[in-house]
Amino acid sequence: MLLNLYAVYDVVSESVSVLGTSTTDGAFIRQNLPYLEKINPNFKTDLQIRKIGTIDDTTCVVAPCEHTIVDWNTYNVPEKKIE
């Protein structure tokens, strides 16, 4: 199965903090939002999710793609953690 490969980029420190895979952009956000909220309460302004490629989960072959920034607003992600 081909999965999307993502990097969570910290725009403040200019570094990648998390790498991960998922079937869709929305699924990656759902899977990682609790962690991102915990590591940075200002995640929507300080962090970007970037789709950087694909990976075949059976062969582990990685193919790069044009980097695209996943828009938080497309997935109705709140500004702050809902308590």
Image (cartoon, rainbow, N blue to C red):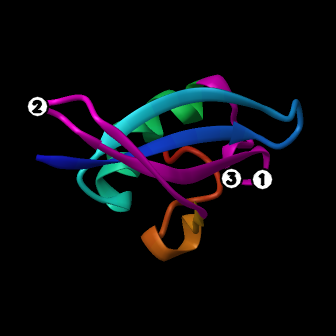
* Left or right side of 24 for 17: right
Q: In this rendering, is residue 29 above or below 24?
A: above
Checking the image for residue 44, the label placed there is 3
Could you tell me which secondary element the residue under label 3 belongs to? Answer: helix
Which of marks 1 and 2 precedes in the sequence? 1
Q: Is residue 8 above or below residue 45?
A: above
Closer to the camera, 62 or 50? 62
Figure quadrant of residue 15: top right
Q: Which residue does the image show at 55% across and 34% down from the upper left?
A: 36
Q: Is residue 60 magenta?
A: yes
Identify residue type, mark 2.
Answer: Thr
**Residue 75 location, quadrant:** bottom left
**Residue 44 image point, x, y percent:** 68, 53
Residue at mark 1? 45
Q: Residue at x 58, y 68 (%)?
A: 71
Identify the mark nearer the N-term, 3 or 2. Answer: 3
| Residue 79 % position (x, y) | 65, 57
Q: Is residue 45 above or below residue 70?
A: above
For the residues marked 3 and 2, what is the alpha-carbon distance in whole angstroms? 33 Å
The label shown at residue 58 is 2
From mark 2 to mark 1, how far is it between C-alphas?
35 Å
Which amino acid does the dot numbered 3 rest on? Answer: Lys
Q: Residues within 10 Å of mark 1 (few under 14, many from 20)?
A: few
Q: Residue at x 77, y 53 (%)?
A: 45
Decide if residue 75 is on the left or right side of residue 22.
Answer: right
Residue 52: x and y in percent read 52, 50
Q: Residues within 10 Å of mark 2 (few under 14, many from 20)?
A: few
Marks 2 & 1, CB-CB < 8 Å contact: no
> Answer yes or no: do the residues labelled 3 and 1 have beta carbons within 8 Å?
yes
- Give the magenta range: 39-68
